[in-house]
Structure formats: structure tokens, C-alpha cells
Amino acid sequence: MRSVHQPTVPRALHPGAWWLWAIGLAVAASRTRNPVLLILILAVAGFVVAARRSNAPWANSYLAFLKLGLVVIGVRIVLQALLSTRSQGNAVLFTLPLIPLPDWANGVKLGGEVTAEALLTALYDGLQLAVMLCCIGAANALASPRRLLKSLPGALYEMGVACVVALTFAPQLVIDARRIRAARRLRGRTRGSFRTTAIPVLEGALDRSVELAAAMDSRGYGRTAHVPRRQRRITGTSVLLGLLGIMLGVYSLLTDAMAGPLAAGFLVLGLLLATGALAVGRQRVTRTRYRPDPWALPEWLVSASGAAVAATMIIASARGVEGLYLAGPLVIPPVPVLPVLGLLLGLAPAVAAPPLTPRRELVPA
């Protein structure tokens, strides 16, 4: 067996495998509003991130997505409390001052009685969206955006360069702001101002942008081969139609907004269009790949783990397994056995993914 097929040999996993695993968890989260299952998905993603994250700057993004999820839940609850009505339940918790609205807003209530059913419904809905965001955050924490850029198809390379530069540029602005505030404190200036902080940060950002553009130009980034204008237009239209078909099919499968066969047909048609357009569009790109990331047994295991989690929840939802949705907001959330076992399959990358550093052997004192 080659070394790349052994999960114990230290190396970086292919970023595409991490994204497939995270998308599988997000699909599973979209199929339930049971808080027990949603928190379990969150725990699975957090455990794998803690076990396999690196020391790179983007490895801490999972914590940022957790905070973003809390903000989403808080906003959802506040809006529900302001716009709550008695139609969702009769268990009144407290009463907010009723704010009068103009005549053109007739039918909208702002304030008044807030019921427990309304707040719990908002909590569960916000928790579902927060868990899906954290699944994306797990992929950001585990997959290097620069290595993901190397694996993108040639037709999407220019778009990928823009995304990677943007993702790399934002954390650098935060680091510059901290550096400037520390320098001001060393000079005895404890009171900061927007003008004295923003201008050095923007100046440093512009300098780095010019240096990055010069470095990328010297290495041949952005150079394309000459192809007929008609071929470029056909390729661009096919890519756009393919991506729209994929988005429509995935949205329909996740939300049950369309019949299953019709949604699957849109998804397959979109995949065919996008694949054909990408195959034709790569003729414009003349770059070569230096040491491409391998796709070996650990990548297959990690991808299969995410696919198994998503398939378990989709099958359980299609067959009407009890426990995926609550009978009412005040009902104690049940613990369905089959979905729980399916979600635990998402822990496989903690063992199947190769470590980034060799394991240290214990030396007796």
C-alpha cells in the first residue's frame, strides 16, 4: 500500500474531502429541527475540528462561526419576541410595551404578549441555521483555501483566485488593526480614533495588494490562451446555466420545495452542463500544477463519512422516522436512535484523516 493511502502517515488531507464532509453534516442539519440532533451535529463537527485542525490562521475560524451562530439565534429570538402573536400558543411569558404603528403598517404588531411557544420555535429555527453555518465554519477551519485553489477546475480558477485573496486579506486587516493599537498604547495614547487607526490600516492593505498583484503577475497568474469569442460565450453561458441548475436542484432537495424526481432531474442536468462547460473552459488556462494533492483512501473515507450522515438523515426524513421534528414547541425533545447512530458516523474523520504532525513517542524519564 502506498503511503498516501495510510491514515497514520502525516500529511494534509485534500481540502475537497473536508468540504464534502462538512456539506454532508449541513445537509443532515437541514433535515431536522430536533435540538438534540442539532447539538449532536455541532458536537461532531467541533470534535473533528479539535482533532484535526492545524496551526494556520484560518484554523480558528470555527470559533468565529460559533459566535456568528449565537448572533443568528439572538436576532431570531428578538425579532420573534417583537413580532410575536397569540397564534403560536397561549403560554404567555411576559408582555412588552405595544408600540403604535402608522396606518400603512396595518396588520403588523410590534410588542405585546410574548408566548413560550413563539420563543422556542424561534430558538429551534435559529439553532438549525446556526448549526449549518458552523458546518461551513468547520470546513473553513480544516481546509486550506490556498490548497483548495490548486484543486479548482481551470474554468473557475480566476473566480477562485479572487475568493482566496479576499479570504486571506480580511484576517490580515484584523492583524494590522491590532498592531496599530498596540503601537499607540506603547506611545501612551490610550484613546484611539477612527482617523488615526483606519488610515494606516488602509495604507498597509493597499501596499500589500500591490505587492501581491506584482508577485502573482511575475509567476504567470491570470495568463490565458487565445480561444474564439464564440467559444468563450458558449462556455460562460453553459457554466451559468449549470450552476443555476445545481443550485435549484440542491435547494429543492434540501427544502422539499419540489418533487424529488423533478429536483433530481434539475440537479443531474445542472451537473452535466457545468461539467461540460468546465471541461471546455479549462482550455483557456495554461497553468500547470506543482505537486497536486493526492486523492487516496483517507479522502474517500472522509467523504463517505459525510455522505453517510446526509444519507441517513434524508432516508429517515423520507420514511417519516419520529423524532426529527417535534410535535410541539413545549414537547421534551426525543432522542431517536437511528438518526443518532447515523450522525455519529461523522466522527470517522477524527481517525480516518491523517494527522498533520507525526505522533510523538513517549520517552521514559
Image (cartoon, rainbow, N blue to C red):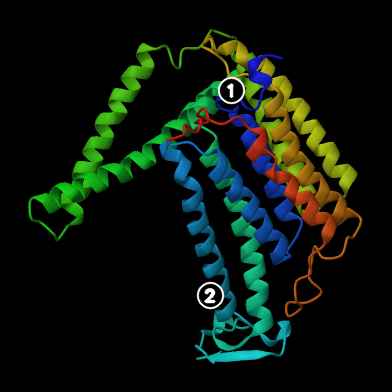
Q: Residue at x 60, y 44 (%)?
A: 48
Q: Position of residue 49 (x, y in %)?
A: 56, 44
Q: Nearer the viewer, residue 32 or 353?
A: 353
Mark 1 crowd level (few <14, some 14–19, many ≥20, 10 Å Cα): some
Q: Label 2 is placed on what type of residue?
A: Val
Can you say which quadrant of the picture contains the C terminus? top left
Q: Is residue 231 above or below residue 93?
A: above
Q: Considering only order in the chain, which callout, 2 or 1, is on the residue closer to the N terminus? A: 2
Q: Label 1 is placed on what type of residue?
A: Ser
Q: Residue at x 71, y 31 (%)?
A: 242
Q: Is residue 147 above or below residue 314?
A: above
Q: Position of residue 339 (x, y in %)?
A: 80, 55
Can you say which quadrant of the picture contains the N terminus? top right
Q: Is residue 303 above or below residue 63?
A: above
Left or right: 314, with 364 as reference point: right
Q: Position of residue 28 (x, y in %)?
A: 74, 51
Mark 2 crowd level (few <14, some 14–19, many ≥20, 10 Å Cα): some
Left or right: 252, with 158 as reference point: right
Q: Residue at x 52, y 41 (%)?
A: 141
Residue situated furthest front in the rendering: 365
